[in-house]
Amino acid sequence: MERVSVQYEDFSVGNEYQMLAGDSATGAIVTFVGKVRDMNLGKNVTGLSLEHYPGMTEKALVAICDQAEQRWPLFSIRVIHRVGDLEVGDQIVFVGVSSAHRGDGFEACEFIMDYLKTKAPFWKKERTDGASRWIESRHTDTLSAQRWE
C-alpha cells in the first residue's frame, strides 16, 4: 500500500480502512478525515482551492510518516491530501494508521495531522461570498505541533 498520495480525486474512507485493517496483528485502526466547512473566520465559505509544490509536498509527507514510524510501533500509515478546487462538504485529507494498541494509533494519527498542517507545503485559498482569500497557518496549529518536539 502506498503511504502517501497527493491527488485531485476523492477517496473512499471504507476502501482506505480495509487496506489498513489487512493485518491480523492489527488491534487498532485510527483515522481522521478533514472536510471543507462552510464557515471560517466569520465568513461564509463557498469552496476551497488547494495548491502544492509537486515532489516537495510528497517528500515532506513521507518524512512525517517516517517520523511517526520511529516514534510509535505502527503496522501501516496512509495519508491522502487532495488538491485543486473543492466544494463545501468535500473531503480534503485522510490520515489513517494501524497498530497493535489504540494509544499508539491515536497519538500517531494526531502527530501526523499536526505536522501535516505545519510542515507540508500546501496553500489554501478560500472562496467566500463574492471574494477569495489566502488562508494563513493558524497559531493553534503551530502550538499543537510544538508539543511533539
Image (cartoon, rainbow, N blue to C red):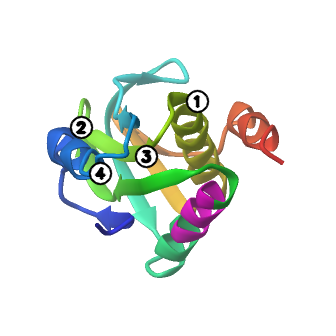
Query: What x and y, as percent, mark residue 104?
Result: 58, 38
Judge left or right: residue 140 versus residue 94: right
Q: Amino acid at mark 3?
A: Val
Question: Is disc 4 placed on a helix, strand or loop?
Answer: loop
Within 10 Å of disc 2 (Cα), the crowding (few <14, some 14-19, many 20+) is some
Question: Is disc 2 placed on a helix, strand or loop?
Answer: loop
Compare marks 1 and 4 and give the one earlier in the sequence: 4
Region of the chain picked out in magenta, as a range: 62-69
Residue in view at x 81 percent, y 42 percent: 146
Query: What x and y, as percent, mark residue 16?
Result: 23, 48
Within 10 Å of disc 4 (Cα), the crowding (few <14, some 14-19, many 20+) is some
Q: Quadrant of residue 137?
A: top right
Which residue position holds label 4? 23
Compare marks 2 and 1 and give the one earlier in the sequence: 2
Residue in view at x 58 percent, y 51 percent: 73
Judge left or right: residue 71 versus residue 18: right
Compare marks 2 and 4 and give the one earlier in the sequence: 4
Q: Amino acid at mark 4?
A: Asp
Nearer to us of marks 1 and 4 is 4
Q: How far, Cα to Cα, is label 2 from label 1?
A: 29 Å
- In the displayed image of the protein, which residue is found farthest to the bottom? 55
